[in-house]
Image (tube, grey):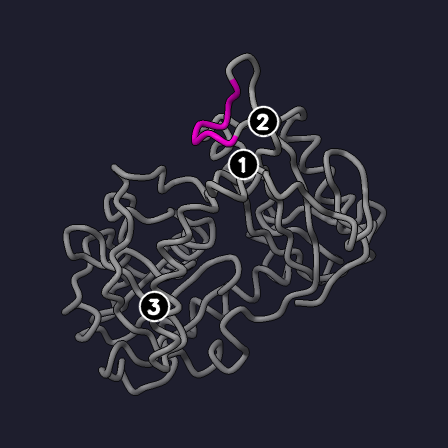
């Protein structure tokens, strides 16, 4: 990971190396932080943050679920994100906002007897390329169906990007990569496909695009929403349904999507080759349109862009 120069913390900019927290931070011990992943792209109209309001909305909703009290509005937060990009003079970057409990109590509940625990907020922006590799974007990745099941929505707020919830994904992806795969897929508690360690899943069968939903304990991602919109706009049939493990093996195409992963084809699941072992035609069509959109080349999707530099 390439560092930048400044990090926004609690309304002020500090040097990258000085953005520190106390070792007794509640969120460090219990995973009670809420975070987001956002990308800023160099577009035909200049640097632009992709789907900024939607990311901010999810961030605020996640904070509310875990009782974080934020001392600024969504509009102020969006402005802080843009200021962080500008302060670091970045044209293309990954943005990681995070809210976390500082000192207050070592008990599990992040609230002391007489006052609430303090929520601190940071915004980090730094250059970051293809999460699953440029080769993976073009030719596809190898995925292992994990023996670790996705945590059920009755056990966690699966709609919140809470740091502690990702221990589930960490266990699964470490196991997959130790076995020579690029990524994992987790099943839900009923044995249906849930998601990857940080991506939603789509499969293509007989020309129809399938994906699952919140009943499978997934994070209903913003990139997932983009893909669903693109598929419909391209005239493709889209079905929301349970996806079984057998469906993976029988799929003509599979791809994963997420802010970090963007749209990444899957060429192999376990030891089954998917399709012809490379990026399929429908995946390529959706992926090509997605990359066209994020670069600002399609006027029909300009609503998804927020200029990072208002003077350009």
**Count of labels in the image:** 3
Badge 1 element: helix
For the point 33% across and 74% down, which residue is it? Answer: 143
- Work out which residue is located at the far bottom of the displayed protein and give it: 276
| Residue 298 in magenta stretch | no
Q: Main secondary structure of the magenta part?
A: loop
Q: Is residue 7 left or right of residue 189?
A: right
SS for tag 2? loop
Give the mark nearest the N terminus, 3 or 1.
Answer: 1
Give the numbered dot on residue 26.
1
Question: Does 180 appear above or below 157?
Answer: below
Q: CA distance from mark 1 to mark 2?
A: 8 Å
197 vs 18: above or below: below
Which quarter of the figure has residue 184? bottom left
Q: Nearer the viewer, mark 3 or mark 1?
A: 1
Q: Provide the residue designation for mark 2.
A: 104
The reply to whether dot 1 and dot 2 touch (C-beta < 8 Å) is yes
Task: Tell me, yes or no, if residue 280 can be seen here.
Answer: no
Report the front residue among 190 and 305: 190
Q: Position of residue 69 (x, y in %)?
A: 57, 24
Q: Is 296 or 71 nearer to us in this picture?
A: 71
According to the image, label 3 marks what residue?
A: 184
Image position of 257 (left or right of 116) = left
Left/right of residue 171 with respect to residue 240 in the rendered view: right
**Magenta range:** 106-112
């Amino acid at each position: 990971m390439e560092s930048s120069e400044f990090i926004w913390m609690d309304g002020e900019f500090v040097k990258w190396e000085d953005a520190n927290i106390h070792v007794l931070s509640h969120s460090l011990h219990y995973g009670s932080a809420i975070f987001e992943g956002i990308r800023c792209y160099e577009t035909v109209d200049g640097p632009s943050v992709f789907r900024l309001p939607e990311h901010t909305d999810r961030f605020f909703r996640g904070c509310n679920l875990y009782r974080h009290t934020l001392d600024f509005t969504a509009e102020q937060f969006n402005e802080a994100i843009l200021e962080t990009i500008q302060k670091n003079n970045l044209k293309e970057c990954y943005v990681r906002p995070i809210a976390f409990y500082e000192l207050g109590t070592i008990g599990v509940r992040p609230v002391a007897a007489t006052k609430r625990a303090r929520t601190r907020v940071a915004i980090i922006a730094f250059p970051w390329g293809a999460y699953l590799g440029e080769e993976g974007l073009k030719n596809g990745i190898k995925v292992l169906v994990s023996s670790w099941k996705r945590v059920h929505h009755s056990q966690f707020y699966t709609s919140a990007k809470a740091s502690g919830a990702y221990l589930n994904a960490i266990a699964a992806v470490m196991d997959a990569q130790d076995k020579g795969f690029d990524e994992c897929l987790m099943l839900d508690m009923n044995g249906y496909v849930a998601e990857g360690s940080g991506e939603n899943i789509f499969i293509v069968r007989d020309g129809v695009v399938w994906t699952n939903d919140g009943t499978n304990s997934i994070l209903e991602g913003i990139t997932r929403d983009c893909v669903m919109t693109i598929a419909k706009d391209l005239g493709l049939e889209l079905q929301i349904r349970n996806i079984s493990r057998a469906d993976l093996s029988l799929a003509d195409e599979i791809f994963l999507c997420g802010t970090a992963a963007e749209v990444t084809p899957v060429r192999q699941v376990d030891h089954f080759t998917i399709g012809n072992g490379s990026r399929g035609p429908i995946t390529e069509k959706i992926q090509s349109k997605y990359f066209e959109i994020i670069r600002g080349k399609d006027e029909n999707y300009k609503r998804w862009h927020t200029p990072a530099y208002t003077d350009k």
